[in-house]
Image (cartoon, grey):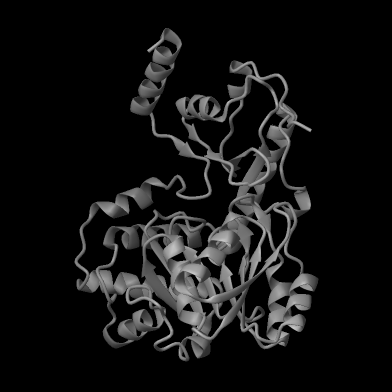
Amino acid sequence: MNTTVRNHAGMRKRAYRNRETVLLTPGPLTTSAKTKDAQLRDYGSRDHAFMAMTADIIARLNAVVHGGDTHVCVPMQGSGTFAVEAAVGTLLPKSGHALVCINGEYGRRIATICDVIGRRRTVLETPEDQPITPALVEEALAADISLTHVIIVHCETSTGILNPLEEIAAIVARHQRGLIVDAMSSFGALAIDARKTRFDAVIAASGKCLEGVPGMGFAIMRRAALEQCRNNCHSLALDLYDQWAAYERSDQWRFTPPTTVVAALAKAIEQFHTEGGVAGRSARYRSNCAILIDGMEKLGFVSFLPRPFQAPIITTWHAPADINYNFNEFYERVRARGFTLYPGKLMQVETFRIGCIGAIADTAAEMRIGRLRPAA
């Protein structure tokens, strides 16, 4: 090992020992001390306290989107992708045909899910820096009457681009098709109102804008749609109809729940409401996003997305063209200062991503990266 590598390794080890890093990522996120502390108690899945906690979470999550009696919240063990596959596999019948809207990696993942579970799908794709437009959805639905569902990512985590959910939902409803929404990076921070926006499912997870820890997904589902889904699912464990029906009968999860994750989410939701719910969290994230973008642009970095399309969740930045730039070294130097970034997920250009908290003020200067603009 040469001296430079050894010095960098020592610097990283000291930093890792001496302080906790801030996660400038789209999830998992840095959690509060109260949320961390909530995981220190053990629960049995049949404990009355745990059962009451689950019931309260389910009610509160449904209320975030004003679901009322017309919608139900169905929890699911695992990451957000578990919940997405569960919702697609439950709601999209074997004879169904989904229009999968894609302008990033997570839309592509949904198309892959359809392929793996044997569901027919057609892709509607736009460039990664352009939203899915209502006109494109209208055209696709009018052109193919075999389409039964539309699946869309509300906020694409691979870039931070926001798709116009309300307008697209209105078109899907007018065409009398089902709508499945991946709201991983928007639920709890951007308003979704079931009284105004018709959907069959809105899917999210504990470790995103609710600021819990990873390990639990959930779907807010239109009750009338879910009631038609018995025996639809390709999977035993991911069947949201069975998950819901079992809970309705017993007030318990079908299979072993992630008890400490649920406890952390319960505490995180308390803080979410103390902050003012969606409005309060949105205001904080929007402020952080504006400060972050302004600061990065003053340093000379170039945002991948035009500002009108930028959601206040995760930002994407062009990799500098400077020969001194190397993402892995950049990442480690930022990490040594107590902040964790995310690499880019785009297909055509090199980027990196920063969540809307924190800053990376002097790392570029230390690496002597002078040209922060991307290559032509």
Residue at left offset 63%, top offset 67% = 191
Q: Can you say which quadrant of the picture contains the C terminus? A: top right
- Who is closer to the viewer here, 84 or 75? 84
Position of 306 with respect to 192 (left or right) is right
Residue at left offset 41%, top offset 80% = 233
Residue 189 visible in the picture = no
Q: Tell me: residue 223, above or below residue 161.
A: below
What count of labels does the image hold?
A: 0
Spot occupied by residue 330 in the image (x, y as percentages of width and height): 55, 27
- Who is closer to the viewer here, 15 or 201? 201
Residue 240 visible in the picture = yes
Residue at left offset 76%, top offset 67% = 133
Residue at left offset 46%, top offset 90% = 227
- Who is closer to the viewer here, 146 or 185? 146
Q: Can you say which quadrant of the picture contains the N terminus? A: top left
- Who is closer to the viewer here, 61 or 12? 12
Spot occupied by residue 61 in the image (x, y as percentages of width and height): 47, 71
Q: Tell me: residue 203, above or below residue 359.
A: below
Q: Tell me: residue 255, above or below residue 272.
A: below
Spot occupied by residue 239 in the image (x, y as percentages of width and height): 38, 78
Spot occupied by residue 362 in the image (x, y as percentages of width and height): 60, 22
Q: Quadrant of residue 120?
A: bottom right
Q: Residue furthest top?
A: 3
Position of 92 with respect to 170 (left or right) is left
Q: Quadrant of residue 102?
A: bottom right
